[in-house]
Amino acid sequence: MDAIVTAGGIPLPEEPLYPATKGNSKAMVDIAGKPMIQWVLDALDQAKTIDRIVIVGLTEKSNVRCIKPVFFVSNQGKMVENLRAGGQRLLEVNKKAQYALFVSSDIPAITGEMVDWVVNAAIKTKLDVYYNVIQREVMEKRFPDSRRTWTKLKDMEICGGDMNVGRLSLLSDENDLWEKITDSRKSPLKQAALIGYGTAFRLLFGSLSLKQAEENIMNKLEITGRAIVCPYAEVGMDVDKLFQLEIMRADFKKRMKKAEKLAGGKKKKAKPAPRAKKAAAKKAAPAKKPAAKTAPAKKPAATKAAARKTTKK
């Protein structure tokens, strides 16, 4: 599968992350010495299930790196246009593509293993959308201070993930689904109209299970899809606010210290102690050959002849 990474967000002065970005791309904010998006690209590089990567919202001048083939699409200004432009570029480089993994550039804690899990969970069937959700207890165990927005269901409390699989045909100009979804993002009334007031009411009071919510919403949107309960909090730990950025920076600091400690431990194990060194050197040294016995000196020929004469007499 191929991945489309969305990196078009530029926080405005009134938005929470502006002090850290100051008019620049959110994807390029520094975390542990790298742009935030670079950690996402590293995870996609490590993933066995990803072949190509399309980055929407940045150009080659951003100096982000990928081992796998990477293609850039400039920022189109709006989320839907960015998604469509990314889908079109992907189809140009891979005409056989039917699905893509849509990844937000602001989930830097993901790993290649997590990417593979999401893709493998989706490719078992042929639905339109596979949407990841993270349970509250999973998120709060990994990131206790994340302060996510929770949807309370009958069987669990969830937040949405930022790495999902979708059919590329949903991005066509004829399909206005994405406009409806993005237009309703910050309006509860529009969201209710989109998914149906009955469903919205039942969601509000937590009287729907995840399965019921999934069926109601997919029927209303006239698409097929499945909500996947993801075991990785990192998939839903996006950076939207300054305190979340600080959580990520602190998390990476711990992660890097742990990696250094492990690397240091391996080096110590690799170096033998002084005594062990000598013993190892002795073992390694080639065994000395025993000194060859000195052969008795040969008598000169003349002496031998004289000896023979004496014997005859």
Image: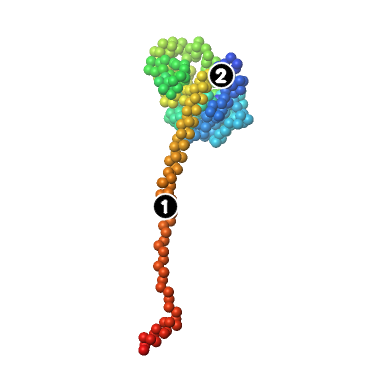
Mark yes or no: residue 198 visible: no
Dot 2, crowdedness within 10 Å: few (<14), some or many (≥20)?
Answer: many
Mark yes or no: residue 29 visible: yes
Q: Would you name the residue on which mark 2 appears?
A: 17
Location of residue 249 in the rendering, given as x and y in whole percent from the top left corner: 51, 25
What amino acid is labelled 1 in the image? Answer: Lys
Q: Which residue is drawn at 40% across and 67% down?
A: 293
Dot 1 or dot 2: first in sequence order is: 2
Check the image and name the residue furthest to the right.
61
Q: Residue at x 49, y 31 (%)?
A: 256
Location of residue 27 in the rendering, given as x and y in whole percent from the top left corner: 56, 25
Of residues 127 and 269, the one nearer the viewer is 269
Disc on res. 282: 1
In the picture provided, is 198 more to the left or to the right than 16?
A: left
Q: Is mark 1 on a helix, strand or loop?
A: helix
The relative height of residue 267 versus residue 81 in the rendered view (above or below) is below
Of residues 292 and 27, the one nearer the viewer is 292
Dot 1, crowdedness within 10 Å: few (<14), some or many (≥20)?
Answer: few
User: Which quadrant would the C terminus be assigned to in this image?
Assistant: bottom left
Applied colour scheme: rainbow
Location of residue 65 in the rendering, given as x and y in whole percent from the top left corner: 57, 33
Q: Residue at x 41, y 69 (%)?
A: 294
Q: Distance between the residues labelled 1 and 2?
A: 63 Å
Disc on res. 257: none
Of residues 10 and 199, the one nearer the viewer is 10
